[in-house]
Image (cartoon, rainbow, N blue to C red):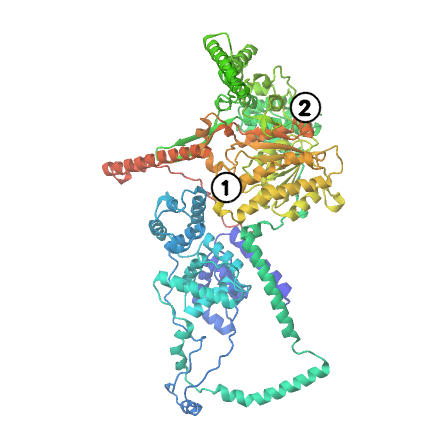
Amino acid sequence: MRPEIEQELSHTLLTELLAYQFASPVRWIETQDVFLKQHNTERVVEIGPSPTLAGMASRTIKAKYESYDAALSLQRQVLCYSKDAKEIYYKSDPVEVQEPKKEEPSAPASQAPAAAPTPAPAPAAAAPAAAPSGPVDSVPDEPVKASLLIHVLVAQKLKKPLDAVPTSKAIKDLVNGKSTVQNEILGDLGKEFGSTPEKPEDTPLEELAEQFQDTFSGQLGKTSTSLIGRLMSSKMPGGFSITSARKYLEARFGLGAGRQDSVLLTALCNEPANRLGSEAEAKAYFDTVAQKYASQAGISLASASSGGAGGAGGAGGAVVDSAALDALTAENKNLARQQLEVLARYLQVDLNQGAKSFIKEKEATAVLQKELDLWVAEHGEFYANGIKPAFSPLKSRTYDSYWNWARQDVLSMWYDIIFGKLTSVDRETINQCIQIMNRANPTLIKFMQYHIDLCPEYRGETYRLAKKLGEQLIDNCKQVLGEDPVYKDVTKITGPKTTVGAKGEIVYEEANKESVRKFEQYVYEMAQGGPMTKIRQPTIQEDLARVYKAISKQASRDSKLEIQKVYDQLLKVVAASGEIETETATKDALALATGANTPTEEDELSTASDDDEIASLPDRKTSIVQPVSSYIPSQTIPFLHIQSKKQTGDWEYDRKLSSLYLDGLESAAINGLTFKGKQVLVTGAGAGSIGAEILQGLISGGAKVIVTTSRFSKKVTEYYQNMYARYGAAGSTLIVVPFNQGSKQDVDALVDYIYNDPKKNGLDWDLDVIIPFAAIPENGNGIDNIDSKSEFAHRIMLTNLLRLLGAVKSRKTTDTRPAQCILPLSPNHGTFGFDGLYSESKISLETLFNRWYSEDWGTKLTICGAIIGWTRGTGLMSANNIIAEGIEKLGVRTFSQKEMAFNILGLLTPELVKLCQEEPVMADLNGGLQFIDNLKEFTSKLRNDLTETAEIRRAVSIESAIEQKVINGDNVDANYSKVTVQARANMKFDFPTLKS
């Protein structure tokens, strides 16, 4: 039988067996008889996590088929994938071939044959000298202890040797207040052990190890295995793998698998500085590490050279004098060698050519290895791994079937109403209606009308409601046919809320704001500013004092006395007069006269309801009688504002430009904002980021967007597919490509892909907007720990961002369509501290405002800097969510991701785009955070207060629980314990009906 037929039959057999097993009742005994007796199967393989069926098959063979197999000469083999993978794939362990060692006999060779004919074991006359390859006494094996594993993981994360990390201290004490490092350690422990006890950071390492040891299996987990693999790949010579190290430790010291794991763990805290050059150096390194482990574990290690002395003499037998054997064969070898050289000279063949080439290759390899080690030592492993390119146009995913998703949304809403899931119109329903209107087309309207015409109203109230709401939606869609889709967010405005429970748990949530329910109210709130953003105006006394000082410096001695008298009289007049008003009082009175801050306006906004939103749904162009800019207080800087550059070089609040921006935000909140025809590049739009919310707004406004991801996978592409399915408007396109902004090759390849002709696998786009928001966190890195991750982050957020803009500039063919670049700036200029080169990256981007004038790309790129304020829930700020409520109580504003995305999308209004073409624009979206001095002290105090409150309540809760158990027994909490019961399947499979 040919191999391909055997393979096909094997596949068919496996498929039929699985089908038979799943579709029929369990008849395993009969199944075994079929393949063991009828087919005489000799190799049985179970594919599963444990040898369940394999064990049953083994017992069946032993009980029923031993004599049967012996009669037919069958040799059966029962294997399980989980433990016999090597045998299944015929992968045998490589055998280390050892060179024979010369032995010097300690007794005359004539004595050896005398002992050979003796049947009984005769004692050797004398043992030869011990060879290093002799056997070694094995050390009793012991699985890895949880104490060593925890000790190593903590020490490795702190980058300290084991003896510098006392186990009597807790993790919280060892990290010296670096909460990021603490969270990373706790995360590693969770991955390693599966689960962690309560408050492990406050427990000394000794006690923590005892708690873990009860449930610890003694096997290495995900974190330790990954660290050991990285050590072997980065520090060991080529070819020296984990398997090589284990075999060496077993052969050299007789260590079992558990002891080998412990030695490898110890090696993590004793990594060599550079990659080891040879296998000999690697073995010497593991000799040192093994001895360190032995001293810590309190065991003694005997090497192979010492352990083999006793065993060598027990071999008995004849001992050949190697020197006499060499002398006997030397003459023949010399003769053969001479003949080989004569033939080589005749054939003009260089016998040493291979050796010479090997020496040259070895020298070249050594030079390259030295350069590689130098590069890795300077840049670090994280940087080296981070700059690897990831872009591939073949992996791009394009989503543009908005028309099809609109039908699915309509049907989903239709049946939700019919089956009673949707009984009232809320904000979410309104948002769905807006998305359907953005995708409205004649075919969709016909599709909707068809279902409404066939709706059987007599079947109940839900059918009548579905027809009523459906007709309203059709009318809305007809009114917006032919109009551009718009981005309009009608979700509720939320704010931070942190509570400490009775048991000490700190709970953070986004709570709805009752005073600010819509985005038009949000814009009004931003225009009003807060107590921290008020501009302090100098008093008349202060102005007079400055004038007096300026005049008195140039006046003579006599005139100074006269000026002093006049100055004193003016001060008395000002103090006694009630008619002189300061500029602040005058402007405040004027503001009051115009109606700013009037209660009626606030009352009108606060009493708006969802029904008003439904009624205004079709009105895509609502006229604004009095713009929000007219309500900006005269002596207050809005939370969101535009700054202009003064002659001194400083950026200051510009009321005129801020009014332009806030009016645009108000129009976007009321009438929506369209991005139809825009071609946009967005980076850093992962789930839960500001970029993701910006991306939703762009595609709901009809833009064509190419978004990049550094974690390209099925899960990520499905995330963007679902986003487009929900928000993609008519004419919008979403293209997802893998991209690493840390790679220069990827930067060039991405821009080429965007601008190349479709014949060259390109998009043939010309970008209108660039939103480069890619970043990675650097928490925990002070100036004494600027590592390779910090350098890589700096490369992403600054170096390659500039390269990206430069690559786009070089591909721009006209000066009439410049691309607007939204630069992600930050108010964090070292304010928080311990964030690596993050603040340096953001400050350096501000040089583009000057380079726009001094360089030649002003007609191809425009600059709009967005100073992004405190945004809750993002990857960079999520750890600070719990103190956001306390920060807002100081009179400043923090933002949700939707709010910040709304602020940034407001920079894409036609008015701001035109302004950016005239000059670089600086948008301060900081929420007044810049007015808080010593922000680090405030945040630390807020965090400490929360932690202290939580610890006190936790202690009180534990004490109360103990007291109740003492009084009422151990089962006092039984009636209050929450028990979740999950529904389970109750399927029945009867025997199939047989044909008669």
Name the one closer to the observer, 989 or 373: 373
Residue 280 badge: none
**Which residue sits furthest left?**
967
Report how far apart the C-alphas of labels 2 and 1 lie in the structure.
49 Å
In the image, residue 662 lies at what x, y percent? Answer: 60, 23
What amino acid is found at the position of numbered circle 1 in the picture? Asp
What amino acid is found at the position of numbered circle 2 in the picture? Val
Residue 835 badge: 1
Q: Quadrant of residue 362?
A: bottom right
Horizontal side, residue 583 vs residue 62: left or right: right
Residue 822 seen anywhere in this rendered image of the structure: yes
Q: Quadrant of residue 902?
A: top right
Name the one closer to the observer, 545 or 293: 545
Quadrant containing the N terminus is bottom right
Which residue in the structure is indicated by mark 2?
A: 480
Residue 996 seen anywhere in this rendered image of the structure: no
In the image, residue 561 lies at what x, y percent? Answer: 49, 15
Image position of 306 with respect to 587: above or below: below
Q: Secondary structure at mark 1?
A: loop
Q: Quadrant of residue 819?
A: top right
